[in-house]
Amino acid sequence: MIRMILPLMLLAAPALGGTPEDPRGLIPPPRAACGEVPATALSLAALVDIALCRNPQTAAGWAAARAAAAQAGAARGAALPSIDASFGPTLTRSNSFQGTGFVDGNGQIVGGAQAVTNTNTSARLALSYLIFDGGGRSARIAAADAQAAAALAQYADTAQAVVLNVVTAYNALAGNRAVEEANRANVAFARQSRDLAAARSRAGVATGADRLQAETQLAQAELTLIQTRGSVATSAAQLAVAVGLPPTMALDLAPAAPLGDAARLKAGAAALIAEAERLRPDILAARANVSAAEANVRSARSAGRPSLAVQASNSLSAVDTNVDRNLASVGVILSVPIFSGWNARYNIAAARAQLEQQQALAEQTRQQAGLAVYSNVIAFENALASLETARVLVASATESAALAQGRYKAGVGTFAELLNAQAAQAGARQQLVQAEFNLRTADAQLARAVGDMGEAIPERRR
């Protein structure tokens, strides 16, 4: 199964074994066929593997990378001789009209109408090899190699974006399910308060207003639970689509892994920015584009330099079954560009401008990556602090709600106090779930900013 680390590994991988389609062994292998979705409970890592195989974005990116690698292989053809062979018969017929003919002393017809039909057969074998062209050939090969590396890095960037989408959708579904559990607990607490108010009303120690308020609070909690179930269904469909499956397909998910620690933050923002410059695929692609532009400048300069080539050929022709001619030739050709309307100068100027453009884009990509890492470090720190506060808030709100319910049951507290404590408890549970979701999302986004999405998946952390 494809893993998110594969694209970066392929950037430095040695040449693959040659095949009839790829004699030089440069083209990455075709994507393997995706198997059936396992019938077992799926972890986040399993969902990521399914997405990398099934998502159309990764399929398109992989095809583009294979096409660029094939272009790099084609560019290497200029380093080898080219051999051409041609063979074929030609049927010719000639008619001549010279008035009245007569028979000469040898019995041959002279003059008059004549028709001659011949079969001319020719065969030719030619070889040509470029010995020197001022560095243009090597520059074009280098440019094709750099473009292939850029395409592979772009695929890696696409794959990491797909992984982030899956992780975010998975966390959203897990968060909505946690909200559903919290709302079930809220409904259960509201039902207990309703039953308590009804019992006190029947005993004559509480007003009917308490019972009505309790009924209202219970109905509101049940309505919130119904709405949450709709959010769960929607997020489940979004996860299925992110994985590359139909939105109606039900996925059996394994329990979410526990929240990770904040070990990543110990490195500091500066170290994480340096790590991003080493790992991020978009930075690698930008650097490869700069290398390709540099090679294009060298290629443009070579157009104004002399070139040296050797050519050899042998041709054989025959009329009917008789050999008519056998011609062989060999020679060395020196080509010296003299004037081409200053095309070479303008091509060099254009290549230099494109190099400057790619250098500027690479620097822009680097700066944006640093800002993304720094911003996500701050977001992760805030999410971590918010989670700690939310846990304290839930603990105190739960204790306060239980105390308020006990005080109302004992007749020393008012129902308004109970409603306030109940609402505070429900709100605290919602904030805790949201804080956990925010932390998981911040963790995934920081991993994406650094360029190491494996750290966003608990099963694949180093």
Image (spheres, rainbow, N blue to C red):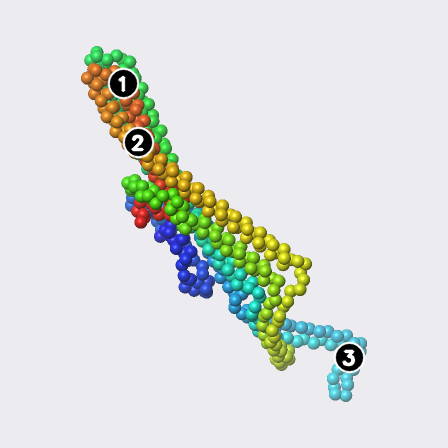
Q: Earlier in the sequence, mark 3 or mark 1?
A: 3
Q: Earlier in the sequence, mark 2 or mark 1?
A: 2
The amino acid type of the residue labelled 1 equals Glu
The one of 411 and 386 positioned closer to us in this rendering: 386
Q: What percent of the width, then of the height, locates residue 321?
A: 61, 80
Q: Earlier in the sequence, mark 3 or mark 2?
A: 3
Which label was assigned to residue 389? 2
Q: CA distance from mark 2 to mark 1?
A: 23 Å
Give the labeled residue for mark 3: 111
Q: CA distance from mark 3 to mark 2?
A: 117 Å
- Residue occupying image coordinates x 33% and y 30%: 431
Observer able to see residue 236? no
- Residue occupying image coordinates x 64% and y 80%: 324
Pair 3/2: label in front: 2
Quarter location, residue 11 = bottom left
Pair 3/1: label in front: 1
Numbered marks: total: 3
Give the labeled residue for mark 1: 417
- Residue occupying image coordinates x 46% and y 62%: 21
- Other-residue count near label 1 (Cα within 10 Å), few / some / many at <14 / 14–19 / ≥20: some
